[in-house]
Amino acid sequence: MSLDDSRKGQLLSLKLRVLVREHLGHAIPESALEPLGFSRGAAVKHGTDVWVLVSDNPQRGLGPALLWALKEGATALHVLAEENTGVLARQAEHFSFPITVWQVNERVLLRAVAAPHVEATQALPEHLEFIDLIASGGAVPRVEHGIVTGEVLGLEVCRAVTDAYTGEVRLEVGMGAHDREAFVLLHGNKPQQEALSGVVASVAKQRHHDAEPHPFNRLAPERMLRARVMNEPGLVGAVSLEPCDPPFARSNVLDVVPCVGKAQDADGKQFIVVFTTGADPDIVPFALDARSYSDPNAELVIAMPDTHITRTNRLALEKATKPARFLGIPAATKNSQLASPS
């Protein structure tokens, strides 16, 4: 931890103690608030209650806070944040464990109200016109939260955009806004299909399990896992799997954020599958929220590499009001992930 991080942690801890004392009443002695280490902000314990201030990426802060409360043997959790508290309050409703979400308004705590899911965004017709071009360039067309993209085994390699200044509609090649901008500067005169085909070939060469370490196979690992299961739906007990929108859009394509699919088994029953990788501490709230967004009554499966399922996440899932289960995906074999799903 750097000195700046240490100083930030101290300031957040002080801020949290002030907020909690002013909310509960100054009659509570300072010694009654036991500071706890919390990497995404600050935490204190008061009796059997844990109070957590989430400062880093609060939209995905409920899971880490809940895991910390369970680790401390708390009987109730209070989550404080300055933004995205409506999302946190909505996620908290999926748990039987007592969770209260508070909006920090200067030095006052206001009880947060659960925000409804945003309505599905429709893609612009002029953006949908690029789907044939994306497919002819070798990428798989995707539409998520109204955004038209092309992927290679889950990695975005192009996106339909409308220029904010000129109103021009175009297909930009690259991974993320900066990469797309750099590609235009370097290859602006190359025909779109030719440019896209070249990128697709380069990415496909690296995006498989036995390739040498490379950014192309490290980015969006959760989407690479979903792409693999689309090729091999039997891994989740399905005969087919199609991507569907997550409960909220990614703010950055380079962020590691779970992705969602709707599966169907041999009997025609549909269920929701949420994919993640690594020891994701927020996967349980995210997955429960994803089910409520796509189909509240569906079975929910959380799919991830079998070695990545943690005991603490299993404990969090046990607190869900509706049943769900983890499903471990075995390591890829030689024949896995070699072809992009259509």
Image (cartoon, rainbow, N blue to C red):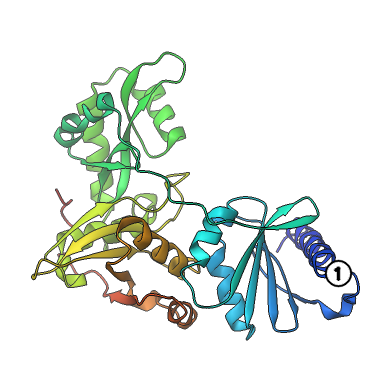
Q: Which residue is mark 1?
A: 25
In the image, is residue 270 above or below residue 44?
above
Query: Dot 1, crowdedness within 10 Å: few (<14), some or many (≥20)?
Result: few
Tell me the quarter of the image containing the N terminus: bottom right
Q: Secondary structure at mark 1?
A: loop
Q: Give the image location of residue 156, x and y in percent.
A: 32, 43
Is residue 235 visible to the viewer in this orientation of the structure? yes
Q: Residue at x 27, y 21 (%)?
A: 190
Q: Residue at x 58, y 51 (%)?
A: 84
| Residue 146 or residue 104, whichever sits in front | 104
In the image as oriented, which residue stretches furthest toward the left?
266
Q: Amino acid at mark 1?
A: Gly
Q: Give the image location of residue 50, x and y in percent.
A: 68, 76
Q: Give the image location of residue 293, x and y in percent.
A: 36, 56
Task: Please identify the quarter of the rendering in which residue 286 is found.
Answer: bottom left
In the image as oriented, which residue stretches furthest toward the bottom?
73
